Image (spheres, rainbow, N blue to C red):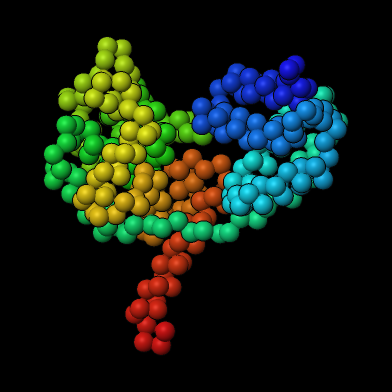
Amino acid sequence: MPQSELAAHIERYLEELKRNNVSAHTLAAYGSDLSQFLNYFSPPGTEPPSPGAFDAWQIREWLGSLYRDKLTAVSMRRKLAALRAFFRFLAREGTIQINPARLVRTPKAPVRLPHVMTEEQVNGLLDSVTAGKLDRPHPARDVAIFEFLYGCGLRISELVGMDLGDIDRSERWLRVRGKGRKERQVPYGAKAESALERYLPERKAKPLETALFVNHRGSRLTARGASLIVKLYSTLLAGDSSVHPHSFRHAYATHLLADGADLRAIQELLGHARLSTTQKYTQVSLTDLIAVYDRAHPKA
């Protein structure tokens, strides 16, 4: 069957995202969301409407189908964001007059505060990793992974994306490539420095491999590979299989805030585009304070 007009525009939009060097994760997510939108309006034997024929009611109908399929509000919000970006692209180039997805209200998502490990829990786990309690083939690398996750508050994609040239060892700074290819500089502390100095002499990489963290084949360690390392240590040493790489990012921000760090500074260190994203850590700290009050105050 010949390709529909809507399908052709979706394909063209995804090619535009590729040219703009969006991350592979974003490209796959947008491709999946827009394909789902296309399939909903392409029942067997019919052609989907052209992009200019869509209105807000049709988009609400699609969201309603997602709700009936028991998708979470968070997933629906992401899919609507992908659709808005697609129609915004078409409006910008003049293919459509208005962006109908802008007229659709974003589903409200429940406010969920991240579970944050205490300083004692984090330090206990990191001390156990450093002590070599597990028989692992690359212990120095594994220690460095944990120290940089917690010591710098990195996303897992940022950690595995680091190259040797991104490290300023004399000043203890990292160049970090975050979401949207935005770069920022992040300092690292003495423990991360010590872990790095132990790891680098043992790093066995393929010729011309620039990645800081490499796998057993000498190639760049993947995000999945690093996540499995974190899960293995956390499960066997701390008895907590729910700990994941992002847990250390939450702990990093919360512990900085609890010790008096400025919220704007934490925003810069984390690479958040909006301060509101960083402010969720103030809610976590307040929750902790209330729990302490309830436990300790005689009139609580």
Please report the residue visible at 51 percent of the width from the left and 34 percent of the height from the top: 179
Residue 217 image offset from top left, x and y in percent: 25, 21
Q: Is residue 2 above or below residue 188?
A: above
User: Of 51 and 219, which appears nearest the observer?
Assistant: 51
Please report the residue visible at 67 percent of the width from the left and 21 percent of the height from the top: 11
- Direction from residue 53 to residue 15 in the image, left or right: left
How many numbered discs sit on the rendered protein? 0
Q: For residue 51, say whether it is visible.
A: no
Residue 171 image offset from top left, x and y in percent: 31, 32
User: Of 20 and 233, which appears nearest the observer?
Assistant: 233
Please report the residue visible at 29 percent of the width from the left and 28 percent of the height from the top: 213
The quadrant in which the C terminus is found is: bottom left
Residue 190 image offset from top left, x and y in percent: 24, 41
Q: Is residue 138 above or below residue 218?
A: below
Residue placed furthest toward the top: 207
User: Of 121 and 166, which appears nearest the observer?
Assistant: 121
- Direction from residue 102 to residue 166 in the image, left or right: left
Q: Quadrant of residue 18?
A: top right
Residue 253 image offset from top left, x and y in percent: 41, 51
Please report the residue visible at 73 percent of the width from the left and 17 percent of the height from the top: 1
Q: Quadrant of residue 290?
A: bottom left
Q: For residue 195, say whether it is visible.
A: yes
Q: Is residue 253 above or below residue 154?
A: below
- Direction from residue 20 to residue 129 in the image, left or right: left
Residue placed furthest toward the front: 45
Q: Quadrant of residue 2?
A: top right
